[in-house]
Image (cartoon, rainbow, N blue to C red):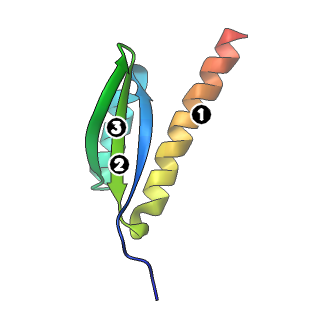
């Protein structure tokens, strides 16, 4: 039996990625909610998704991870 319950995941989205992140959530019809603004450069959002949208969420995770990796590389 498949698990069809909605799931959610929080993301800290850097301001430089806002347009790309929200375009991707819109394209995949993911539900998003602003949780907090921890600092002027970051939004914390919660993305709610169905199991069938898992790949789209994984792409968002990769987007954030790649940005953080590039940012770390720039700091070195």
Lower position in the chain sequence, tag 1 or tag 3: 3
Camera-near label (1 vs 3) is 3
40 lies above or below 9? above
Whether tag 3 and tag 2 are in contact, CB under 8 A, the answer is yes
Camera-near label (1 vs 2) is 2
Lower position in the chain sequence, tag 1 or tag 2: 2
**Residue 12 percent coordinates (x, y):** 44, 31
Relative to 56, 28 lies left or right = left
Residue at the image point whose x is 56% and y is 43% from the top: 62
Residue 17 appears in which quarter of the rendering?
top left
Q: Image quadrant for the C terminus?
A: top right
**Residue 13 percent coordinates (x, y):** 42, 30
Residue at the image point whose x is 42% and y is 68% from the top: 51
Could you classify mark 3 by the number of other residues whose Cα lies within 10 Å: few (under 14), some (14-19), or many (20 or more)? Answer: some
Residue at the image point whose x is 52% and y is 44% from the top: 61
**Residue 15 percent coordinates (x, y):** 38, 21
Q: Secondary structure at mark 1?
A: helix
Q: How many marks?
A: 3
Tell me the number on the disc at residue 4.
none
Q: Residue furthest right?
A: 76
76 lies above or below 67? above
Can you identify the residue that label 1 sits on?
66
Cα distance between the residues tagged 1 and 2: 19 Å
Q: Nearer the viewer, residue 11 or 58?
A: 11
Can you identify the residue that label 3 sits on?
45
Q: Secondary structure at mark 2?
A: strand
Q: Residue furthest bottom?
A: 1
Could you classify mark 2 by the number of other residues whose Cα lies within 10 Å: few (under 14), some (14-19), or many (20 or more)? Answer: some
Relative to 66, 12 lies left or right = left
Could you classify mark 1 by the number of other residues whose Cα lies within 10 Å: few (under 14), some (14-19), or many (20 or more)? Answer: few
Tell me the number on the disc at residue 47.
2
Q: Secondary structure at mark 3?
A: strand
């Amino acid at each position: 039996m498949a698990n069809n319950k909605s799931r959610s995941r929080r993301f800290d989205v850097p301001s430089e990625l806002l347009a790309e992140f929200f375009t991707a959530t819109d394209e995949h019809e993911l539900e998003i909610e602003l949780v907090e603004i921890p600092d002027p450069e970051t939004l914390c959002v919660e993305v709610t998704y169905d199991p069938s949208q898992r790949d789209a969420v994984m792409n968002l995770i990769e987007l954030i991870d790649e940005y953080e990796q590039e940012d770390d590389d720039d700091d070195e």
